Image: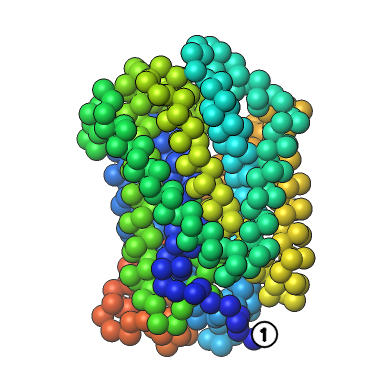
Amino acid sequence: MSETLERWGSRRAFILAVTGAAVGLGNIWRFPYIAGENGGAVFLLVYIVFVLLLGLPVMMAEIMVGRAGRRGPIQALGALAAEAGGSRHWRWLGAFGAFTVFCILSFYSVVSGWSIEFLVASINGKFSGATAQEIGAGFDAFLANPGLLVFNHTLFLVMTMGVVAAGIAKGLERLNNLLMPLLYLLLVTLAIYASTTEGFVPALVWLFKPSMALITPTVILHAMGHAFFTLAVGACALMAYGAYMPDKQSLPKAAAAVAVLDISVALLSGIAIFAVVFAQGLDPTQGPGLMFVTLPIAFSELPWGAAWLSVFFLLLLLATWTSAINLAEPMVATLQGAGMKRVKATMAVALGVWLMGLLSALSFSSLADFRPFLGRNVFELVSSIPPDIFLPLGGMLIAVFAAWVMPREKAQEALGNSGWGFYLWLNIVRWIAIPMTFIVLLSALF
């Protein structure tokens, strides 16, 4: 199998693309409610530790494999394993990664469809003057409407796959260059607005003054899973981007830039959200409904609240759109590596994700009583097990492959550092990242 011919047009394009894959629901929807449920500042502290000790080294490993293989994930893993004299069965790790992204994108599309609905509702002033009971009842009625959920799920997928079908330069790169700066501008604007509210100082205390007594195995598991989820690590998505990486770009610098940008989005969104929540005296531990029930309640009582709420849901939609586009690309690249044309590969991925997403969309109405595993419906399963279990497992196996299996000279060349930097990375991955991920996964499973 020959190397891929496509490359990102610039170093900036690569960083924006990987950041686009990383920044999305994980930072703006999932981080605030998981932090709220797991002690606020203590969760943030453990999460940042996991990003630095696990997420960043494993991100570098995943990009490195793609850069060394210059193919789709399955083909790159198989070719590099064969070159090192290892088992070609390593290629199935690429298939596992594609399955993980498939599951994540199926519920991702459904929740992103919610942001479309709420953006339209906020622009129309639907939440202005509404009581907490009315907003909560409206969200419940929306979830119970299968036709509306499926429509928004379908619309979001059409928006996503249309860009993916256009290819790297005309599709992903062009949209990332336009939307990622806009996303950060909106987020900074919201954070500045949050600083003017009465809840700003309580939000800072909630996020930055940890109580060590609140650290539990559950907090540790959720923090590790979120570190992998928010960086898009462990599903071979970044492996596909590594294959397109410019030859002269510094991988460590690019990965560090993505990690910093990703954490900054989580922090800014947490400050913006919790400042508004505390300003209205609301509970920050509302779970997944924090974004779609608690925030509309909080903004509805603030000056110009409808306008700011519209800006927030626009931010959420842009973040999820860029992230979904960048998550879909590896699956399309995998099918392309098997000989399928890009447009047909995109249509095949879109159809599969759409069908799987129907099960999540209907989990709140028609399939509410269908609980196939652990008493959970399909939405609860695909929004918890793939992020918390599959991504860390995939990340650990990718790290094992990069640190122990692939040819050493290939790894050094792909990392771009054959001196002390390479051996620092190698030892962190071998003796810290892999064992820590294994221990936390064991605790989660047993």
Q: Quadrant of residue 45?
A: top left
Q: Residues within 10 Å of mark 1 (few under 14, many from 20)?
A: few
| Residue at figure coordinates x 46%, y 78% from the top left | 246
Q: Is residue 10 above or below residue 58?
A: below
In the rendered image, which quarter contains the N terminus?
A: bottom right
Element at badge 1? loop
Above/below status of 128 relative to 3: above
Query: Does any portion of residue 90 appear in the rendered image?
Result: no
Residue 289 picture location, percent across and down: 51, 27
At a point 68% along the width and 75% down the height, the residue shown is 337
Q: Position of residue 369 (x, y in %)?
A: 73, 27
Q: Position of residue 420 (x, y in %)?
A: 26, 80
Which residue sits at x=46%, y=68%?
14
Comparing 78 with 298, the one in front is 298
Tell me which amino acid carries mark 1: Met
Can you identify the residue that label 1 sits on? 1
Residue 92, image x, y percentages: 64, 69
Image check: 256 left or right of 114? left
